[in-house]
């Protein structure tokens, strides 16, 4: 059975003290919740990963990275490699977030290299993708999502998919307060599972957790998570508040 996941992408928020405090608060607030087959993840900034891992010790909170460079090492000022992340205990890396694509020119091709590096290092990725508003208005959203997945992931062999979590994040819903409806999310997630089944097998498609991201809040999480192909959420703004994030975790 594929895992349910609630992941908080903190983006460029929280200094060292705030990161540790938020994890401490989160540990406390989820301590008594009963979980089955559910992962709770937070993604602090690079500089706070080590202290966050320490703060999350002896809890079910997993600490993951927001990005990674594809090269092993070398003259890439300001970048972080898989070895560096592994050396501090990171096991999972978010890749392909729309903000990375928009502000840092990441492309399907550069992301394919990063995915390969993640897998070569036996890490897991939460791979993000999703259409722009103009794509959806032009009824192009399925084609855009299919090409994003094809270009960045469909060169992988079937066994690699056990290290992939997908996060469908329609760009028009990120940080806008506008959410995809539960029906829109389900429609896209079912489409995604369908193209994975076509390219690989139904078994591969059924085993992949597909998260929805884009203005998920405690008030809308339950409805979105109730859909059969929605396996959880990648949460931005609401992950910065322990009560909101806990509310979303309760919804799953
Ligand atoms: P918001 O939840 O703030 O819309 O952000 C979603 C997101 O980008 C998670 O990666």
Image: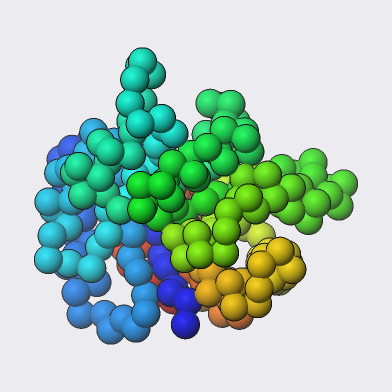
| Total count of labels | 0
Position of 65 with respect to 251 (left or right) is left
Q: Residue at x 26, y 80 (%)?
A: 33
Q: Is residue 66 above or below residue 169?
A: above
- Residue 199: x and y, percent? 71, 64
In which quadrant of the rendered image does the C terminus lie? Answer: bottom left
Residue furthest right in the image: 138
Residue 106 lies in quadrant: top right
Residue sitting at x 80%, y 51%: 143
Q: What residue is rendered at 28% in x and 84% in y?
A: 34
What colour-coding does the image apply?
A: rainbow
Observer able to see residue 73: yes
Name the one closer to the observer, 149 or 100.
149
Q: Position of residue 153 (x, y in %)?
A: 60, 51
Residue closer to the observer: 181 or 63: 63
| Residue 88 spot, x, y in % from top left | 19, 44
Does the image show residue 136? no
Relative to 252, residue 105 above or below: above
> In the figure, is residue 107 to the left or right of 22?
right
> What residue do we see at 66% from left, 73% from top?
201
With 167 as the anchor, is 79 left or right in this view? left
């Amino acid at each position: 059975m594929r895992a349910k996941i609630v992941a908080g992408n903190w983006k460029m928020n929280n200094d060292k003290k705030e990161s540790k405090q938020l994890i401490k608060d989160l540990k406390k607030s989820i301590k008594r919740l009963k979980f089955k087959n559910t992962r709770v993840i937070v993604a602090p900034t690079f500089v706070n990963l080590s202290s966050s891992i320490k703060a999350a010790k002896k809890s079910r909170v997993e600490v993951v990275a927001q990005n990674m460079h594809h090269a092993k090492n070398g003259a890439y000022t300001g970048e972080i490699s898989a070895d560096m992340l592994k050396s501090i205990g990171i096991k999972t890396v978010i890749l392909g977030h729309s903000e990375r694509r928009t502000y840092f020119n990441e492309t399907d091709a550069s992301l394919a290299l990063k995915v390969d590096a993640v897998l070569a290092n036996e890490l897991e990725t939460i791979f993000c993708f999703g259409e722009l508003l103009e794509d959806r208005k032009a009824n192009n959203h399925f084609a855009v999502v299919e090409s994003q997945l094809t270009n960045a992931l469909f060169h992988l062999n079937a066994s690699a998919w056990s290290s992939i979590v997908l996060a469908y994040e329609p760009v028009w819903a990120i940080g806008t307060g506008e959410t995809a409806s539960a029906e829109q999310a389900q429609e896209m997630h079912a489409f995604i599972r369908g193209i994975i089944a076509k390219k690989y097998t139904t078994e591969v498609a059924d085993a992949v957790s597909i998260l929805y991201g884009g203005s998920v809040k405690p008030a809308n999480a339950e409805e979105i998570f109730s859909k059969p192909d929605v396996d959880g959420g990648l949460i931005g703004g609401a992950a910065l508040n322990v009560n909101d994030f806990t509310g979303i975790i309760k919804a799953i």
